[in-house]
Image (cartoon, rainbow, N blue to C red):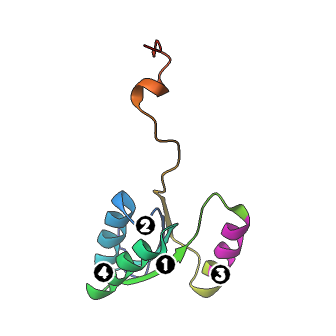
Amino acid sequence: MKLTGKLVLITGGSSGIGEAAAKLLASRGATVVLMARSEQNLKRVANEITEDGGTSHYFPVDLGDHKALRVLVKEVTSGIGVPDIIINSAGAGKWLSVLKRTKFNSGR
């Protein structure tokens, strides 16, 4: 797949799989739009992409805030464009031990 000129939106783009995907896709010519809660980490990833010759934009947002997300989607689509690819890499959930998550926990 040719990525030059493609716009890729990545949620969870400030770390982990989202960060790795953003860097790889940007190195292959895609423009990446990074979204996550941590502005500091988003800025770091965006700067690293730029330093490596790629193009990126970043937007701090809590994806659970539907009002903020609607505003941001309008901003991205009107200011940058409609994404060709969307990668949903944002994590959500409660961090519990495996024993607390299973029905097999006998409470011992």
Relative to 23, 108 lies left or right: right
Q: Residue 58 carries which label?
A: 1
Disc 3 designates what residue? 75
Q: Name the residue under label 4.
A: 48
- Please tell me whether mark 1 sits on a helix, a strand or a loop: strand
Residue type pointed to by label 4: Glu
What residue is pinned by disc 2? 13
For numbered disc 2, what is the local secondary structure? loop
Q: Position of residue 59 (x, y in %)?
A: 54, 76
The tag earlier along the polypeptide, 3 or 4, is 4
Residue 7, can we see it? no
Q: How far apart are marks 4 and 1 (CA)?
A: 12 Å
Rendered location of residue 103, percent (x, y): 50, 17
State the quadrant of the N terminus.
Answer: bottom left
The kind of secondary structure the magenta stretch mainly shows is helix
CA distance separating discs 3 and 2: 18 Å
Left or right side of 74 for 94: left
Residue at image x 31%, y 72%?
23
Do residues under tags 1 and 3 come within 8 Å of each other at their CB atoms?
no
Q: In which quarter of the image is the C terminus?
A: top left
**What amino acid type should be assigned to the residue bearing mark 2?**
Gly
The nearer-to-camera label among 1 and 3 is: 1
Does 100 sit left or right of 50 as displayed? Answer: right
- Residue range corresponding to the magenta coloring: 67-75
